[in-house]
Amino acid sequence: MTSKMDVEKFHLLNHLWNESINNNIEDAMVYSNDMIVLGNTLKIDTIISFGFDRKAVTYSYLNEFDSSGVYFKKALNIYKKTNDFKKIAGIQRNLGQDHNMTGQIDSALYYYSESKINYTKANDTIGIADILNSEAIANLMKGYYNIAIDKAITAEKIYIKNEKNQDLNQNRMVIASIYGEMKDTVNAINYYNKTIDFFREQNQKRQLCATLFLLTNLQISNKKLYNENDQLINEMIVLSKELKDPALIDDVQTNLAKFYFTYDNYKNAEIVQRQLVKNAEERNYEYSYAFVSKDLAKSLIAQKKYSEAIIYLKKSDAIATKLELNGLKPIVNKLLSKSYEALNNHQESLKHYKVYEDLSSDIYNTESTNRFSELQTIYETEKKEAEIALQNEQIKSLNIQAKNDRLTKTLYGIGMFSFLAISSLLYFGFTQRIKKNKIEREKQEAIYKQEIEFKKKELASQTLHLVQKNTFIQELKENLEKIKKSPELFKVEFRRLVMLLKKQNAEDKDWEVFKSYFSEVHNNFDIKIKSITSDITEKEIRLASFLRMNLSTKEIASMLNVLPDSVLKSKYRLKKKLGLDKTDDLTQFLNTLN
């Protein structure tokens, strides 16, 4: 039989775990183990599962995700037996967070989706806000910044309404990170400062240290903030040592090295980075090793130690290839090109520069694809929400009508005389309500249709903007500068530039995606043109689409990489194919194809 003392011991252990998890992780592990032992001794599943849950979270804090996954699933099995939806949802969220940390974003989103279902069953609004916050982090990692900020701010509103200050400030760290990725440093710094004030007041050292790390990482390159950054980094060093967390200590040292590098103190940066490389190697943290090796190489290059820099860059590149760190590889190859060029090894320099350019192009295409995917996700989500809202409105109207029908039948049962006496009034009221409901429904349908159309047009506009994004011009300038500095590379570079131009001109991937959205917004525009003239070419359809968007000749020429005269000639040929006279306005005609 469970005594009052046993229950109090459990609550004490849980309290001690909560107090220590952010300040002394070793003690937190001890308390979670004590909970499991207590649960097994008393043969109480709820205490055992709680202990499993707390132990799993502790392992997550230590970045030991294999171990955390084992204990989360043990706890989950117990909660499923009792149909404790809130606890099930909490475990699923934690599993999702672990997958987030290891870069398995789609798996994370799956767990978040399952968790949201169970939080909804438990009628837990705060739990749903937690999931929105977690989904924001996952979308941030996918590069879906608009979706991420929307979910994070929705969560923020829920936390504020329910006065959940701890959750609110955790959430604001996420919002700040998203703003940082969106290059909105003003909002990012504002949110970081809010959370720093809160964590200082609450003496929550781990969260404070993590927030200071993110803030300094954002503003460390701003030399005007030397004194502030210096103060923040020193505070982080003290906190990380107090917490005795090796991973956190390394994070702080990483920012310290960046701080030294920013102010041209390359020697001190090198000393810190060599220790970080050693730590990563000893702990077999390949992911960290790849990045700190790259940073160390930058400091070595700044000191003209090119041969040694190449050694570390090659190690970084090998791990980046193995772990598919696609964002790191172009940076490493650009640094390799720079190092070899300084050593007058032009052949190796050119080889790595070509790899850098190819990878940079791949990253741009990936970012474009991510942006298209995000826009499509937003569009599909809002379209679905509009359809559901419209269905609910129709159901509501039908329910009102059904209620009126039942009322009519009841009145009929009173008797013919009574019915005739009030039928005129009833009929008038009934028809007025039906009419009013119909008008309201039609208004609502019109609003939803307008919203959907607006979102479609907005989507098409943004997609077009994406197609216009022509980064290869900057790349072209860089290559021309390279030729200018190294005339001996002219022949090789010139041929490559010609190929680059041809490749850019032949790139149709973005056009195909744009065309699908454009066709949806403008009611199968291409099909309507083909119905007028069957021998129209794909290039002519593209030209017609741009004209339908009311772009000028100069803008179209820029997008197609041709001279304005070529666009004018193409417009003339298109008019002929469409059977228009010289006096007819081509753009005006295309605008009629709705």
Image: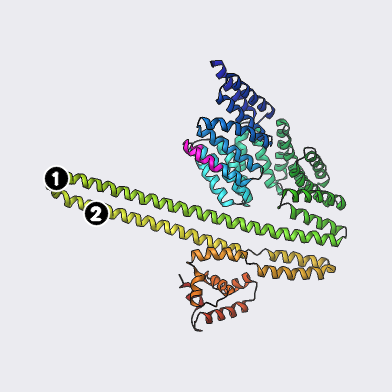
Residue 201 is drawn in which quadrant? top right
Residue at left offset 60%, top offset 38%: 95
3D distance between C-alphas at marks 2 and 1: 22 Å
Residue type pointed to by label 1: Gly
Q: What amino acid type is highlighted by mark number 2? A: Thr
Callout 1 environment at 10 Å: few (<14), some (14 to 19), or many (20+)? few
Asked whether the beta carbons under mark 2 and mark 1 sit within 8 Å of each other, the answer is no
Nearest the camera: 385 or 257? 385
- The residue indicated by pointer 2 is 431
Name the residue furthest bottom.
Answer: 582
Q: Give the range drawn in magenta.
A: 112-126
Q: Is residue 494 above or below residue 438?
A: below
What percent of the width, then of the height, locates residue 439?
Answer: 32, 56
Q: Position of residue 558 (x, y in %)?
A: 63, 71
Q: Is residue 119 left or right of residue 412?
A: right
Asked if one can make out residue 304 in the rendered structure from this viewpoint, the answer is no
Q: What element carries label 2?
A: helix
Give the foreground label among 2 and 1: 1
Q: Is 586 above or below relative to 173?
A: below
Answer yes or no: is residue 143 visible.
Answer: yes
Residue at which label 1 appears? 415
Question: Based on the displayed image, in which of its 4 quarters is residue 249 positioned?
Answer: top right
Seen from the viewer's position, the closer of residues 236 and 146 is 146
Q: Quadrant of the C terminus?
A: bottom left
Colour scheme of this structure image? rainbow
